[in-house]
Amino acid sequence: MISKKYADMTTKTSIIREFAEYAGRRAAEIGSENVFNFTIGNPSVPVCDEFTKALQKLLAEEDPLTLHGYSPTLTIYSVRKAVADSLNRRFGMEYVPENIFMTSGAAGALAHAVRCVTQPGDEVITFAPYFPEYVPYIDGTGAQLKVVPADITSFQINFDAFLEMLNPNVQAVLINSPNNPSGIVYSTETIEKLAKILYEKQEEYGHDIYLISDEPYREIVFAGTDSPFISKYYDNTICCYSFSKSLSLPGERIGYVAVNPKCKDAELIIVMCGQVSRFTGHNCPSSLMQLGIAEVIDMTSDLSIYEKNKNILYTELTKMGYECVEPGGTFYMFPKTPIADANAFCRMAANELDLILVPGDSFACPGHMRLAYCTTTEMVERSLPLFEKAMQMCK
Amino acid sequence: MISKKYADMTTKTSIIREFAEYAGRRAAEIGSENVFNFTIGNPSVPVCDEFTKALQKLLAEEDPLTLHGYSPTLTIYSVRKAVADSLNRRFGMEYVPENIFMTSGAAGALAHAVRCVTQPGDEVITFAPYFPEYVPYIDGTGAQLKVVPADITSFQINFDAFLEMLNPNVQAVLINSPNNPSGIVYSTETIEKLAKILYEKQEEYGHDIYLISDEPYREIVFAGTDSPFISKYYDNTICCYSFSKSLSLPGERIGYVAVNPKCKDAELIIVMCGQVSRFTGHNCPSSLMQLGIAEVIDMTSDLSIYEKNKNILYTELTKMGYECVEPGGTFYMFPKTPIADANAFCRMAANELDLILVPGDSFACPGHMRLAYCTTTEMVERSLPLFEKAMQMCK
């Protein structure tokens, strides 16, 4: 018999995918230039030329047996060293290669990290609004995901609700800053307060609590935003990173787990990542991709368009009367919908205006909508009258 | 607390790795030319030039946003079509792209396939000698791996023992032909007999039994060997393939699941693979690698050296008195050790002669040793006096 668990998963429809697929169908019908598709977080600027050149050089000059050969169980040492050195240089940390494990993007990193630090029955806390794929990553471990309701006035952490939810079964806390979908960056004050609570609760409960920090948008931070390097503030932090957004390589599935060297069992957790990788049949990201990103480790794509798009959308939408907390990074914003029913609003905008947004219900935060503005500025500008019309239609 | 399960896995030493690491240390001490390392199944011939050129062309000509963009959940459709067309052309099958799911090599394919067709508590039967990584793939599903003892006279299937072991809890049978470690290829007669039994038992038990066929060595078959395409003989077959060996790309982690179009729930199983991939945080192999292999789908590396090495080793070792079933493919052979204790023999050969072999105990088949002869012919020839000496030392 086929697996009930995975068969059941196939029947659950994703609202994000539903809207994205609708956008695709409409593009086929009326031309993609007539569909204002803000559904998907797919980077819209190409990888830097240096990356393409690095791959071409590797292909031209390296022995193909070495280049395409098996990675060691804990991934390629020189690449782990390049990541550690870069983090140390940029954030004043003291990582060694033994703290780094290369993964299939942040998704792979999260799935590894959660498996390493939880047992079935444990609780993992995250904060709304949150990326819905956290659910399968946590389910996969047998742990339970608990969600702290959003503080919709700032999208920083709702500490009162968090404190109420903490209990001795909580083994890990999962945060995502800069945040998908809100675009908010947790401030130094927020991270310091979170760290203080976690240190106190570790003491109180007599066990470690790991902070799993999902950071694929770390390099997309806008001018003037306070953007602390989270691992600096709490020893038991596992940083989960992806090059998908910073280098526009989402299909290449390349990222890493970086365990704070001061984390309890830091090196053991990395060795355990190797075992998780065996267990899932994954066995390392592509060796060419590992070696390629090591060559451009401190570079990014030209990410400036995201800030430009944010400035236009934030300024104009707030003028129109949309209420929105101003994003500090990412390529998302998360305004309130003019009517409380975000699903109804997003369906209306899609059906009447070909303006395709995603309702916040998907991110455990109703009454809001996510705009993924990783698109051309021209499209952003042409969309403004439609946002205006959508607002009018609600009056 | 860190996960007991994965922490425990890190403490279990792998005998294969132990011998391989010993070979590495000795190479550092006395020079790799003085160590006769037959431990690891790492291809020794480079990928065909056409693959390198295909990647270079993709990098030079394709829009980087498309080239490195997210794969669809079920992997890239044009690549799935290239795989299906190739299998149809070569083996007279009728696959459609909807039967194909691209994976991280055969390991990823197996881990997906097993998760799709078993529930916790089910039994999966495999046949000794077998690749020890099957254990974590099956453990990962909550199913139980049951091992049919080897028929050491032929390394075909021990059907009497298989029939005794079959019971209604068996949901899947996992085979590997051409076989690691024996090098044996299951004959048409063996596959037909296996299929007949499985059809009968499906009827008797009133449920499907899936045949999971692990085929990374499918393209490495020697002259005169009967090498049936397994999926042709049994409808409920899930073929798990890797380009690691045929194209010498083990580090790129690229392979596929191909579900026989006549398989019950064929298309649903592929959709389920997409869910398994989410659950493990894997989300598709590298998009560049998917697109690259589609360009060389019917090609292989020059694999002739493996047959040349096999011919030398088989001829000379049998002359020396080693008993061995002649391999029909792969780059492994699996002779009896001259003394019953294969561990003791392999340690002696390693310590006294720097001749590094792997004891068959690792493959659930004591009294044998695996030679991975994916090495230079020159090294094979220079090793012969050492095999002679090892034999003499046992007399």
Image (tube, coloured by chain):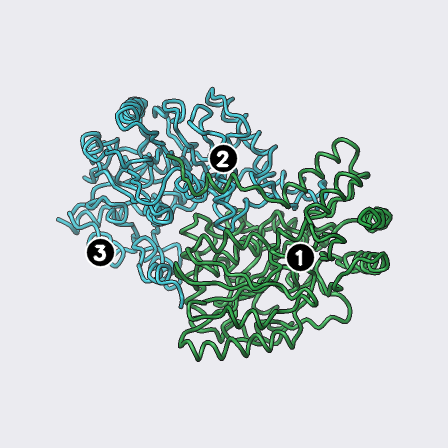
Chain colours: A green, B cyan
Residue situated furthest left in the rendering? B395
Which amino acid lies under the numbered mark 3 shown in the image of this protein? Met
Residue A7 location (% of width, % of height): 46, 38
Q: Dot 2 surroundings within 10 Å: few (below 14), some, or many (20 or more)? A: many
Q: Amino acid at mark 1?
A: Pro
Picture quarter containing residue B225?
Answer: top left
Quick one: quadrant of the N terminus of chain B? bottom left
Residue denoted by label 2: B270
Q: In the structure shown, which secondary structural element does the residue marked by tag 3 occupy? A: helix
**Image quadrant where residue A335 sits:** bottom right
The residue wearing badge 3 is B348
**Residue A266 vertical position relative to residue B163 in the rendered view, above or below:** below
Picture residue at 46% right of the left edge, 58% below the top: A144
Precedes in sequence: disc 2 or disc 3: 2
Instruction: Say which amino acid is labelled 2.
Output: Ile
Residue B221 to residue B52: above or below: above
Local SS, label 1: loop
Q: Are callouts 1 and 3 both on one chain? A: no
Disc sitting over residue A181 in the figure: 1
Question: Along the horizontal axis of the image, is B139 left or right of A247?
Answer: left
- Residue A328's quadrant in the figure? bottom right
Which one is closest to the eye, mark 2 or mark 3?
2
